[in-house]
Image (cartoon, grey):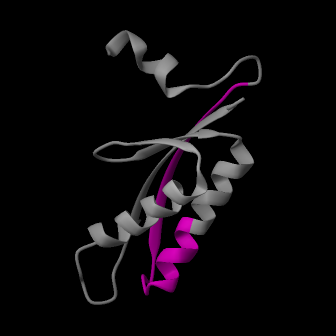
Amino acid sequence: MAESLVSIQIIPTTKNGEDSIPFVDEAIQIIEQSGVSYQVNPLETTMEGELAELLNIIEKMNERLHELGCPSIISQVKIYSRKDKQASMQDLTKKYR
């Protein structure tokens, strides 16, 4: 059961001022490879799962972007966590869909 929703907006700087979108795409690929449920939105990506697992994914995203040569990265993270029932993107947004 997913107990948390974590949204991340990752903002890498690039060595030579390159477009950051390919690096953001690489970070999203880390999420995709993890197997957790996620949704890409225009300004952030939201994941569902166990909090420790989701934070580990964020750590891997940052590590990968450093491996690709990004000298610095800003990771803006939002966390919604529940213990009494499942945390779900669908439940939180269904009245808007």
Q: Is residue 80 magenta?
A: yes
Q: Which residue occupies 65% across, 53% down?
A: 55
**Residue 97 at x, y = what percent?**
32, 16
Quadrant location of residue 15? bottom left
Compared to 48, does 57 lie above or below? below
Please name the residue shown 58% across and 59% down the image.
Answer: 58
**Relative depth, front residue between 47 and 66:** 47
Residue 34 sits in quarter: bottom right
Q: Who's the residue at 49% across and 27% down the image?
A: 89
* Relative depth, front residue between 74 and 43: 43
The reply to whether the magenta stretch includes residue 64 is yes
Residue 67 position in % (x across, y down): 51, 84
* Quarter of the figure with residue 13: bottom left
At a point 54% along the width and 70% down the height, the residue shown is: 62
Q: Is residue 96 above or below residue 8?
A: above
Q: Position of residue 31 (x, y in %)?
A: 52, 56
Between 63 and 76, the one lying in front of the other is 63
> As rendered, which of 87 and 32 lies closer to the eye?
32
* Range shown magenta: 61-82
60 shown above or below 79? below
